[in-house]
Amino acid sequence: MIYNSLPARRLVFALALLCAGLGIYIYQQQSKLADAEALIRSLQAKTKEVAATPAHADGAEALDNSASPELMVEGGAEEAGPKDQRRGGKPRRGFGDYAQMMDTPEMQQLMNLRDRGMLDSRYAELFKNLGLPPAQLQKFQQLLIDKQSTFRDVLAAMRTQGLTPNRDNADQMRTLVQNANAEIDRQIQSTLGTAAYEQYQNYELTQPQRATVERMQQRLSYSGEPMTPQQATSLVGILSQNTAPTVADAALGRPRGGNYGAGNGSGGAITPQAIDQSRAILSPGQVNTLIAIQQEKDAQAQLTRQMRQNMSAVRMPAAPKN
């Protein structure tokens, strides 16, 4: 009898509305999740399809601002030409396929999110030391993101003009990248002021060495001889003073000694002079760790060079014998 009362009927009706609302909400969330999963699967399929050809494995690397025009062309930047007999006579994918894929709104959004997410891993210490107001910091961060995407922006601009990256226009590409980076640097200097800009420049130039020291700190963190902050700061200075810029780094204005694209591992090369000088601030065990990291970098560089030589041999088969 209680179910026939007015309050009980109202309660049942309210519960029914609540269940219906929850059902609609769950359906909407499931739909959004399904759309997101479909987008991810689509992007993954595109990436796998483009990356399936070993002869152009360096093309994706060339889309980053760290790749030089020479490496980009050498790694397969020219448009698809002869058919690749190893894939059943299908046309090889050229650099234009990579650039076209990166021009999609989905990939642009993913790369922007990736670049923003990488800021703290690279510049958190600088942000802390500068102590900028929120608005000024936000503007500075956006300029850094713009600088990271300069190379991709130049490639996109060339494509809109119907130009295909190749050996003939490598110098033009380098000039465009340099000019774009110089303009962003002027904006950064205007945003930060002279003193803070010099601090930023020094931080940028020592990025490769900081990466090496951070790698060493991580390895020593679970040992009996962890590095002190003072040792880390001194070692960054020693490494930066004993690492010469490569030709490609100087041409594109990249941090010296980074040797990007040469496969020497994170943080550039460690010279024998740097190891000798480090003995004044590090314990023997810590020096041995630095030597081990230097050996790992050399092995990685040798491995990468060998892989590129093998890929070049595949792209350029030996001439038939008479």
Image (cartoon, helix red, strand yellow):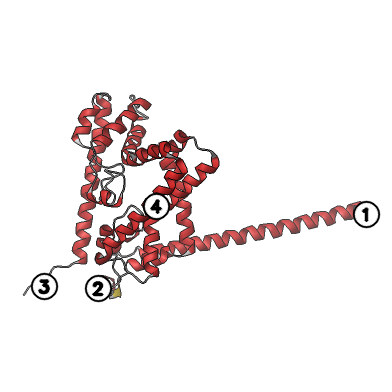
Query: Is 225 or 271 nearer to us in this picture?
Result: 271
> From where the camera sits, is residue 19 visible?
yes
Q: Which residue is mark 4?
A: 183
Residue 109 screen position, x and y as percent: 49, 58
Of pointers 1 and 3, the one earlier in the residue sequence: 1
Secondary structure beneath label 3? loop
Q: CA distance from mark 2 to mark 1?
A: 80 Å
Q: Nearer the viewer, mark 3 or mark 4?
A: 4
Q: Which residue is disc 2 drawn over?
A: 85
Disc 4 to disc 1, C-alpha distance: 74 Å
Q: Nearer the viewer, residue 64 or 253?
A: 253
Disc 2 element:
helix
Sort mark 4 into few (<14), some (14-19) or many (20+) by Cα contacts within 10 Å: few
Residue holding disc 3: 320
Q: Secondary structure at mark 4?
A: helix
Q: Residue furthest left?
A: 322
